[in-house]
Image: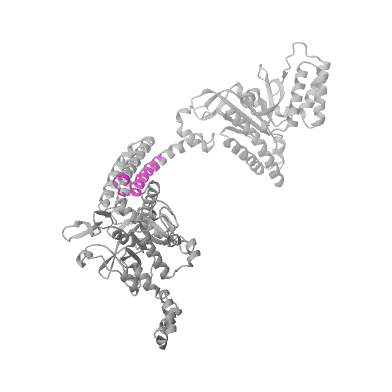
C-alpha cells in the first residue's frame, strides 16, 4: 500500500514539475497556451462593461455615403470638405484615419490641363480664364493637405516586419525624448520596412500612427496590440496611441519599467505614461485590447450626413473621430475574442477608450513568478493530500482548489485590473485529480473483476458496476425477498434433438439460448440456471429491483419476439422452427447461495418459484406462449391481459388466477380489447354455471378466432359439466394433476 502511494506521489510531482517548466518558459506546451487564450476570451466575453461613456465615434464610409458621393476611394477634395466640416462646424477634437494615403489623387485630365497652362496657351486669355475657373477642382491633394493644417489630424501608416526594401511614402516624426540607449534597453518590435503617406499630406497633418499588429496571436485573434514600434533606431506610435495623445493637453510620453537584473541593468517595460495616465503594457509595449462590446459598440455616423450637416453638433463636439468603413467589400475585419468578424477601426476605438478610462488590464512580468509559485503550492498540496482521501473527499478537495483559483483570478481581474494565469493551475488540478481517480479506478476495477468472477454466471455484466457501488445490498447468506421468476422451455425439443447430430445440436442450443439470455440481461434479470433447452431467471436480486415484475414480464414478451426472428433465421439454415413457452410469477422467494462445501449456486427457492415453473408447463395446455399469475398481473397493471382460468396446480392447494399478457394497454386495438371483454364475461357466465349463455358467447368468439385453443377448452368443459354438474358449491377452480 505504501509502495503504491509513493508511486502516486512520484507521478504527481513529475506532473507538477512539467507544468512549472512550462510556466518558466523552459518548455512550451501548446495546449496550455491555447487553453489560456480560450480562458482569456471567455473572461472578456462575460465581463463586458454595461455602461460606458464613449469618447470615440466612427466616421463611416457606408453604403449610403457611397451612393451619394461615389465608390471609394473618394476624391481628396471630398475628404478636405469632410475634414473642414468636422473641425469648423462640428468642433470635433481629433480625427484619426484608419486609411493609408500613399498615392496621389490625380488623373490624366489634371496632368493635361496643368501642362497646357504652362504651354504657349499661357498667353491665351480665354484659356487662362477657363483654366482659372476649373483650377480649384485640380490639385486635390493640396486641398486635402490644407484641410489638415493646424488641426488634430492623425494619418495611418503600416510597418512591415520582413521586407526591408519596402520604404514608401513619408514617415511622421518619431516619438521624441527617447535616445538610442533607452530604446535598446527594451524589447520593442523592430520593423524592417514601411508604407506611409504622401509627403505633402504627412507634412501638414499633426502626426501619424501605424495600424498593423505584429503581436497577433498564433490563432489569429486580436488580443493585444503594440503601442510602440521601433524603426531605424527610432520609436513610432500606434494609431490609437497617437490619436489619444492628440486628444489630450498633457500628453508627454514616458516609459515605466522594472529592473530585473541589477548587474546587467536589463529592464522590463511595464508602463507607458501619457501625462498622468498610466497604460499597462508587456515587454514588447503590447497592450491588452479592452473590448467594451461586440461590433457597433461605438456610434457610426455616415460621412455624407456630416458633409450635409444632418447630424446635431453636440454628438460630435469635442469627440474623437476615427475614419473607417462599414460598407460591404471595404470592411477591414479582424478576429477578436468577441466575434470572428470585427471591424479593425473598432479595435483602435476600444484601445483609445480603454486608455482614457484606464480600464486596460495589466499582465506584468512578475506574474510569471506568481504562476510558478501557485503551481508549486497546488502541485505539492494535491500530490500529498489526494492519495489519502476517499473519492468523495477527493472530489470536494478538487472543487475547493478550483474555487480558490477561480476566485483569485476573478478578484484580480475585476478589482485589480490584472490578468492572472488560470488554465495552467486548473489543468494541473484536474490532471492530478484524474491521476488519483484513475489509480482508484484500477484498484476498484480489480474488486469488480473479483465481483464479476463471483456473480458473472448470474447477473448481466452491466450490473456489476452498480453492484460494486451497492455492496451493502448484496446478501449471499440467504433472505426472503419479493421477486419475480421466469421459466421458459422449448416446445418439442426432444423430437428436435433426435433429428440432429451432437455438434449441430450444441450449435442449435447456443443459437437460441444466447439471444434469449441477452433479453434477460437487457432487462436487469439474473440467470439462475440453464436446464438443457430451458432457462430459469429471476428479478430482484442480488440488487433490489422495485420494477422486478414489469422487467420480468417485458423480458418474456421480448423473448417471444426474439423467437420470431430466430424462426426466420433457422429456416434459412435448414433448422426446425423454434417455439417456446414462458411462465412468470411474482411473490416472496428465498434467495441466496445454496449448495454444499464443494459447489454452491446463487438461486431462488419457494412456493412462488414452483408456481412459476407450473405456469410455464400450462402454456401447452392452454395453447398460449406465455402465462403469468395474478400476482404478476396486479404488479404490472399497465398491461392488457386475457384471463385464462382459475386453477389449482399440482402441489398447491390454494387456487390462483392465470393470465395471458397481450401487451401495453395503449398499444391494444379496440377490437382485441372488445374480444377480451366478451371472453371475460363468458367466463363469469361459465363460473355461474350458465352453460348455454357461456357456450353461446364463447362459440361466437371461436368463430372469429378459430385458432385460439382456450375457446375449445371451455366449450369442452361446458359440454362435460352439462352432463356432470359440479354442484352448487363449485368455485370455478380447475385442478391440474400434472406438472
Q: Which residues are magenta?
A: 413-440
Q: Quadrant of residue 168?
A: bottom left
Left or right: 630 as drawn, with respect to 299: right
Give how far across and how far down residue 318 sits, in percent. Answer: 34, 56
Q: Is residue 214 visible?
A: yes
Residue at image point 33% right, 37% down: 388
Left or right: 575 as drawn, with respect to 335: right
Q: Is residue 196 visible?
A: no
**Residue at the far left in the pictured view:** 263
The image shows residue 141, relative to residue 244, as above or below, that is below
Left or right: 632 as drawn, with respect to 731: left
The quarter of the picture where the C terminus appears is top right
Is 417 a magenta residue? Answer: yes
Q: Main secondary structure of the magenta part?
A: helix
Give how far across and how far down residue 192 sits, in percent. Answer: 32, 70
How many numbered markers are drawn?
Answer: 0
Q: Nearer the viewer, residue 151 or 690?
A: 151
The image shows residue 708, relative to residue 588, as above or below, that is below
Residue at image point 71% right, 23% down: 738
The quarter of the picture where the N terminus appears is top left
Residue at image point 41% right, 83% down: 117
Is 268 a magenta residue? Answer: no
**Residue at the far bottom in the pictured view:** 120
Give how far across and how far down residue 416 sits, in percent. Answer: 28, 46
Residue at image point 27% right, 71% down: 232
Q: Quadrant of residue 24?
A: bottom left
The image shows residue 237, relative to residue 296, as above or below, that is below
Give how far across and how far down residue 193 sits, in percent. Answer: 33, 71
Amino acid at each position: 500500500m505504501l509502495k503504491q502511494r509513493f508511486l502516486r506521489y512520484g507521478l504527481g510531482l513529475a506532473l507538477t514539475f512539467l507544468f512549472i517548466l512550462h510556466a518558466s518558459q523552459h518548455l512550451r506546451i501548446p495546449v496550455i497556451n491555447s487553453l489560456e487564450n480560450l480562458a482569456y476570451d471567455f473572461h472578456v466575453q462575460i465581463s463586458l462593461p454595461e455602461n460606458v461613456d464613449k469618447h470615440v465615434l466612427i466616421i463611416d464610409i457606408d453604403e449610403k455615403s457611397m451612393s451619394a458621393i461615389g465608390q471609394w476611394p473618394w476624391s481628396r477634395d471630398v475628404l478636405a470638405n469632410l475634414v473642414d466640416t468636422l473641425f469648423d462646424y462640428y468642433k470635433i477634437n481629433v480625427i484619426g484615419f484608419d486609411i493609408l494615403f500613399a498615392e496621389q489623387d490625380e488623373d490624366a485630365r489634371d496632368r493635361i490641363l496643368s501642362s497646357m497652362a504652362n504651354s504657349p496657351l499661357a498667353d491665351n486669355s480665354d484659356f487662362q480664364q477657363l483654366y482659372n475657373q476649373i483650377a480649384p477642382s485640380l490639385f486635390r491633394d493640396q486641398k486635402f493637405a490644407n484641410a489638415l493644417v493646424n488641426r488634430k489630424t492623425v494619418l495611418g501608416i503600416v510597418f512591415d516586419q520582413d521586407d526591408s526594401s519596402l520604404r514608401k511614402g513619408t514617415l511622421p516624426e518619431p516619438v521624441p525624448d527617447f535616445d538610442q540607449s533607452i530604446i535598446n534597453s527594451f524589447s520593442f518590435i523592430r520593423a524592417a520596412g514601411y508604407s506611409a503617406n504622401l509627403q505633402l499630406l504627412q507634412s501638414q497633418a499633426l502626426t501619424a500612427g501605424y495600424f498593423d499588429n505584429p503581436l497577433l496571436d498564433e490563432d489569429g485573434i486580436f488580443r493585444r496590440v503594440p503601442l510602440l514600434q521601433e524603426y531605424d533606431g527610432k520609436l513610432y506610435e500606434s494609431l490609437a496611441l497617437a490619436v489619444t495623445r492628440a486628444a489630450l493637453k498633457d500628453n508627454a510620453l514616458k516609459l515605466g519599467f522594472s529592473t530585473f537584473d541589477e548587474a546587467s541593468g536589463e529592464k522590463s517595460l511595464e508602463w507607458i505614461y501619457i501625462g498622468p495616465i498610466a497604460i499597462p503594457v508587456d515587454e514588447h509595449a503590447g497592450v491588452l485590447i479592452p473590448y467594451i462590446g461586440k461590433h457597433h459598440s461605438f456610434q457610426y455616423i455616415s460621412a455624407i450626413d456630416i458633409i450635409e450637416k444632418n447630424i446635431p453638433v453636440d454628438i460630435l463636439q469635442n469627440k474623437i473621430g476615427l475614419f473607417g468603413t462599414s460598407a460591404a467589400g471595404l470592411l477591414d475585419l479582424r478576429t477578436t475574442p468577441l466575434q470572428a468578424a470585427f471591424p479593425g477601426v473598432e479595435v483602435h476605438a476600444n484601445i483609445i477608450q480603454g486608455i482614457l478610462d484606464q480600464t486596460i488590464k495589466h499582465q506584468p512580468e512578475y506574474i510569471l513568478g506568481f504562476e510558478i509559485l501557485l503551481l508549486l503550492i497546488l502541485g505539492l498540496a494535491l500530490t500529498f493530500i489526494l492519495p489519502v482521501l476517499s473519492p468523495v473527499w477527493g472530489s470536494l478537495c478538487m472543487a475547493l482548489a478550483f474555487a480558490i483559483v477561480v476566485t483569485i483570478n476573478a478578484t484580480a481581474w475585476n478589482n485589480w485590473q490584472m490578468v492572472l494565469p488560470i488554465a495552467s493551475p486548473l489543468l494541473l488540478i484536474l490532471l492530478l485529480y484524474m491521476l488519483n481517480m484513475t489509480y482508484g479506478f484500477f484498484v476498484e476495477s480489480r474488486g469488480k473483476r473479483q465481483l464479476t468472477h463471483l456473480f458473472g454466471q448470474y447477473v448481466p455484466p452491466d450490473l456489476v458496476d452498480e453492484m460494486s457501488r451497492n455492496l451493502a445490498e448484496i446478501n449471499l447468506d440467504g433472505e426472503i425477498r419479493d421477486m419475480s421468476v421466469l421459466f421458459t422451455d422449448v416446445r418439442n425439443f426432444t423430437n428436435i434433438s433426435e433429428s440432429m447430430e451432437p455438434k449441430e445440436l450444441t450449435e442449435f442450443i447456443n443459437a437460441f439460448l444466447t439471444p434469449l439470455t441477452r433479453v434477460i440481461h437487457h432487462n436487469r434479470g439474473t440467470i439462475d440456471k440453464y436446464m438443457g433447452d430451458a432457462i430459469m431467471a429471476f428479478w430482484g436480486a442480488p440488487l433490489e429491483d422495485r420494477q422486478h415484475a414489469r422487467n420480468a414480464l417485458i423480458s418474456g414478451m421480448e423473448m417471444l419476439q426474439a423467437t420470431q426472428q430466430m424462426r426466420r433465421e433457422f429456416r434459412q439454415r435448414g433448422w426446425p422452427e423454434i417455439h417456446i413457452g414462458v411462465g412468470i410469477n411474482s411473490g416472496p422467494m428465498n434467495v441466496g447461495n445454496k449448495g454444499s462445501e464443494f459447489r454452491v449456486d446463487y438461486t431462488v427457492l419457494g412456493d412462488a418459484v414452483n408456481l412459476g415453473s407450473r405456469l410455464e408447463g400450462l402454456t401447452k395446455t392452454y395453447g398460449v406462449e406465455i402465462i403469468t399469475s395474478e400476482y404478476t398481473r396486479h404488479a404490472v397493471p399497465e398491461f392488457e391481459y386475457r384471463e385464462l382460468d382459475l386453477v389449482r396446480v399440482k402441489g398447491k392447494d390454494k387456487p390462483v388466477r392465470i393470465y395471458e399478457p397481450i401487451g401495453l394497454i395503449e398499444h391494444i386495438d379496440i377490437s382485441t380489447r372488445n374480444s377480451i371483454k366478451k371472453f371475460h364475461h363468458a367466463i363469469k357466465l361459465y363460473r355461474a354455471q350458465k352453460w348455454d349463455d357461456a357456450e353461446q358467447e364463447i362459440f361466437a368468439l371461436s368463430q372469429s378466432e378459430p385458432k385460439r385453443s382456450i375457446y375449445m377448452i371451455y366449450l369442452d368443459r361446458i359440454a362435460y359439466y352439462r352432463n356432470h354438474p359440479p354442484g352448487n358449491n363449485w368455485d370455478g377452480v380447475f385442478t391440474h394433476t400434472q406438472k
